[in-house]
Structures are given as structure tokens and as C-alpha cells.
Amino acid sequence: MTNLNPEQVNQARNLLGNSKNILVSIPDSPAIDTTAAGLALYLSLSASGKQVTIVSPMQMTVEFNRLIGVDKIRNNINAQNGRNLIISFPYQEGSIEKVSYNIENDTFNLVIEPRDGFPAITSEMMNYSFGNGDYDVIITLSCSNPNELGQILGKNQNLLRGKNIINIDTDNKNSLFGKINLIDSTVSSISEIILGLLDQLGLPIEPDMATNLLTGITANTENFSSQKTTAGTFEAAAMLLKYGGRKSQFEAINPISTPQFSRQVNKQDRFGQKGLTPTFENNRSIPFGRQPGKFQPGQATDISAKPGVPQQQTPFPGNLPQQQHPSLNEVSKPPETPPDWLKPKIYKGSTLL
């Protein structure tokens, strides 16, 4: 299913095994596949006893509601995720004269002294956040470079500095910014990579996790119809179904257009009096005409009839009076030739005008 570097996988196994607090980060404007993979990884690591946080710079919209655990995704790193208080404000080169602190009456005072000729620092310019001091490892998904972390990185400039990073991606142009880089561009989706990684690391794969991963693969392959789909993709889907994954009602972004027939049923006629109509994607339809709910002997079907308009019944030959029935001999017997048909004819007429 995946072609991950075995040595890198072993390093990830050792690193995660020795880590307690883990941050899973997905990029700004993530695809359903990336979000599904991140949630599956979050749920699996949590089930194995780790303290896990999952963050994304973007608020989750309604299209992500089908994913299990989507409410666990945070948009910032708050006090529950780290212990380092970070005070941020716009900075101009040379604008700060001195930074110091003092403690008075059990109060800590941070003193920032601006240099002469530069504007004062106001409270409106301040931005407060909490750093990542407690994270043992950071896992990034579908990030070609750290800048794709958006405001998560912007508000936490030291987020990646000195941290153990596991970089997971399908893009072969990835900048390889992680300590461990698990990159595979041959798979259909990031969800397929996460499935292979969970399997190789021996991490739990429960029905909810399998459902998320199956949804991610289905979304990224447009219901298994895109060129990204491989034999390994179907193997991954089969494995997820065995793990209890449930097929999502996800509609592909570009589904294959195939004509589908649908029967229109009137409330007053549950046998389909309105007929069978083929429905096409361009909303054009070809009526097949009215189809009676129940065939009555002796009653013909007028294909030009319109719904709601009474039809005139045309008797079948089987219902004609007996005397109107031609016999078989009469039907097959050719018409008789007049006796004088082959004799010469003499024209008789007047030439007078």
C-alpha cells in the first residue's frame, strides 16, 4: 500500500514510543483527505495512551462534519497545550532599547523600553499565546514547508525550533523540513499513508479511525474514479472495511456522469402512472410516454398520451365481434382478377367537341 522508507518508519516508532505529549498539525485550508487522516492519527495515538492535540489554522466548515472527532480540532495552541507564555507585537528593527523585568508585591512586571524616535508600544498591539514547551514531537500532515501551517506558526515562532518533527506528505517536492520525513508520492491520498503507518507501527485501528481513513481515500480519489486510484488503493479500502470502517455518503467533487433511470411516482398512483424517465446530468430528459399501472386485456397503450388526459381505448382484434373476424383463408387468399382483364380493350367515345 505504501512505499515508506523502513529506516524512517523505525525512527518514527522509537520517537513516538518515547513521547508522551504529541501535536498533530494540519495546514491552512486542508482537504477532507488531510483532515480525515489527521483525525484518524489523533484518535489512534490517543487510544494508545498518548496526550495528543490536533490543530489547524482554519475553522472547520460544515463539509467536515461527517468526520469523527472533528470537534477536537483547535485553531490555536492555548494554555492546555503548552506552558510558555509568548507576548507578541509588531517590531521594527532598532525600535527596542531594553527589555527587563522586576517583581513587586508578588507581581511579575515585564518592562519593554522603546528607543527614542520610535512610537510607544500600546496594549492594542499586544498578542498573547502559549508556546509549545510541553510537546515531545510534532507531526505535520500535507505540509510541503512550515509556512503552510499559517497562523499556527505565525503566533508561535518557536513552534518548530528544536522540536522533533515527523513530516508526512504525498508531495515529492516536499522541502523535507522534518527530523523524520515520511514521503510517498505513489499513493492515492494522505489517508492511505496513515493507514500503512498505523499498521507498521502497531498502533490501534478502530472502526472510527477506519471510517475516517475510508472517507479520506474516497474523497481524494473521487469515489475511486480518478487516476490516483491504484490496486493498493483498493487493498487499503478492503483493509479498512475489515477494521469496521463505514462507507461515507460522500459525493465526489467530479463524479462520473452516467445516465440513471428513475421512476416518478404520483402520490395517487403508487404504480408509476407518470412513467419511466431517464434523468441525465444536464437535466434533459426523454419521456417514454405513459405506462399504465396495470395491463388490462383489450386496452392499448397510447405512447403519445399525456398524464392526466383521458385516453381513448382502442379495441384489440381479440375483442372484435365474431362476424368481423376475417378467416385465415380470407386473409391469405389473393383478390380475384376480373374475367375480361386480359382481353383487348376498344376505346369508344365521341370526337365532337
Image: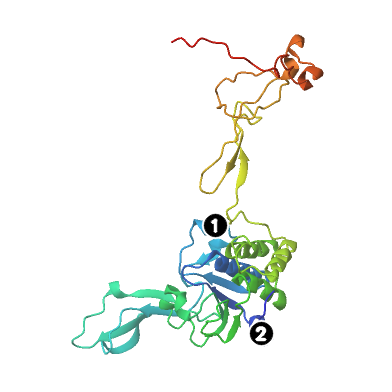
Q: Nearer the viewer, mark 1 or mark 2?
A: 2
In screen coordinates, is 112 left or right of 17?
A: left
User: Quadrant location of the C terminus?
Assistant: top left
* Horizontal and vertical percent position of residue 237: 69, 64
**Residue named by callout 1:** 65
Which residue corresponds to the image point at 50% horizontal and 56% vertical from the top-left?
A: 62
Q: Nearer the viewer, residue 213 or 283?
A: 283
Q: Is residue 129 visible?
A: yes
Q: Type of residue at label 1? A: Asn
Q: Are marks 1 and 2 in contact (CB under 8 Å)?
A: no
* Callout 2 crowding tier (Cα within 10 Å): few <14, some 14–19, many ≥20: few
Residue 155 seen anywhere in this rendered image of the structure: no
As drawn, 60 above or below 189: above
Dot 1 alpha-carbon crowd within 10 angstroms: few under 14, some 14 to 19, many 20 or more:
few
Q: Is residue 329 left or right of residue 14?
A: right
Task: Name the residue located 73 percent from the left edge and 17 percent from the top edge.
Answer: 337
Task: Name the one closer to the observer, 103 or 95.
Answer: 95
x, y percent for residue 138:
55, 79
- The quadrant holding residue 338 is top right
- Residue tagged 2: 5
Q: Nearer the viewer, residue 311 or 276?
A: 311
Quadrant for residue 123, please give it. bottom left
The CA span between labels 1 and 2 is: 34 Å
Q: Quadrant of residue 279?
A: top right
Judge left or right: residue 24 versus residue 213. Answer: left
Chain-order first, disc 1 or disc 2: 2
Q: Position of residue 226 (x, y in %)?
A: 60, 65
